[in-house]
Image (tube, helix red, strand yellow):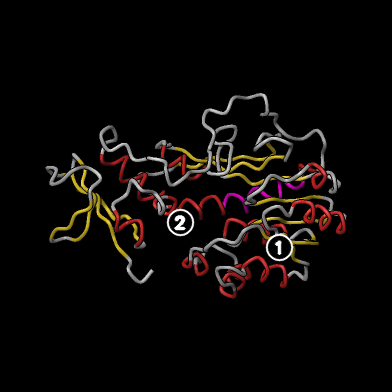
Amino acid sequence: MKIVFIGKDGIYSAAPIHKLAGKHEIVGVARSAPRSFTPFLSSQSLWPPRLRRLLNRRTSSTLLPVIAADLAAPVFELKKGGLTELTSFIKSLAPDLICVASMSQLLPRAAIDAARYGAINIHPSPLPAYRGPNPWFWQYHNGEPEGGLTIHRIDEGSDTGPILAQRSYTIEPGTTFSEMLVTTARLSSELILEAAEAAADPGAGRLQKHLPCPFYARRTTSQDRFVEWTNWPIERAWHFLRGAHRFLAPSWELPTLLRFVPWTIGGFERAARVNESGKFGKDGAGFYLGHSEGKIRVRLNRRG
């Protein structure tokens, strides 16, 4: 099967394209808006040796081009408003299937129709829950005990196409985003061949467009307020900040220092409140965010 792959720089796209390339021909790669990559993932022994070598050759902004070069596949740089050019790129390659693993724009119908079997998308939630562009963040925000990975056909809607493969996993308290990213990437690599083969059957797929979406995972803005300091127990606030802190960098609800200095969340400790909830503080053990039930430890990284 000839496949055009669309994704971003990072393990979430690297894992499935690597798996697909082992059985099918990747005839083209489209790279959507690059994003930073979690460095430690490239050395993890859970990935096959060839994929580890590719990850070690990448920089934060060149992972997909490195993989494409290894596969001798042409690369298309997808910019905002570049869907017409992307469609032309796909048509020129006459693929059997398009596979999307993270894309900042909805794939147009003309592009979908350019592939013999249409297009499939890898979505990091248990659809129909958390359709939309920001499923990881909102699963953290809502304190979901279970996450999921769904591969579905792409239609004109936002994550509404028939489901070809799906699997769930437990979100343990304190799970970091890197850990969740590794889990979803591993699941995508395990399910992608099954989904790609199913896509060749026009009748395959479990319909879900008619099902209600319990929560739509919209994009966030700097004006949003997320942490409900007066209502959330300390463990929930800790879990949310520990997993979703990378999405909160521009948020003005955070203490001033945390808007401009890279930071991560450590543990938490129950104690009598020492300052107002959500306020930044420091004691003999280091920095923390205050909570009515104790302290949430903050690790600052002034070197970035």
Identify which amino acid the numbered label 1 is placed on.
Glu
Q: Residue at x 84, y 55 (%)?
A: 88
Magenta stretch, residue numbers: 186-197
On screen, residue 206 above or below 178: above
Which numbered circle lies on residue 178? Answer: 2
Q: CA distance from mark 2 to mark 1?
A: 26 Å
**Is-magenta flag for residue 196?**
yes
Q: Nearer the viewer, residue 20 or 300?
A: 300
Question: Percent from the top left, x then y, of residue 83?
Answer: 75, 51
* Proximity of marks 2 and 1: CB atoms separated by less than 8 Å: no
**The disc label shown at residue 77, or none:** 1
Prevailing SS of the magenta stretch: helix
Give x and y (percent) for residue 264: 34, 58
Element type at mark 2: helix
Q: Which mark is residue 201?
A: none
Horizontal arrangement in the rendering, residue 209 relative to residue 59 (left or right)? right
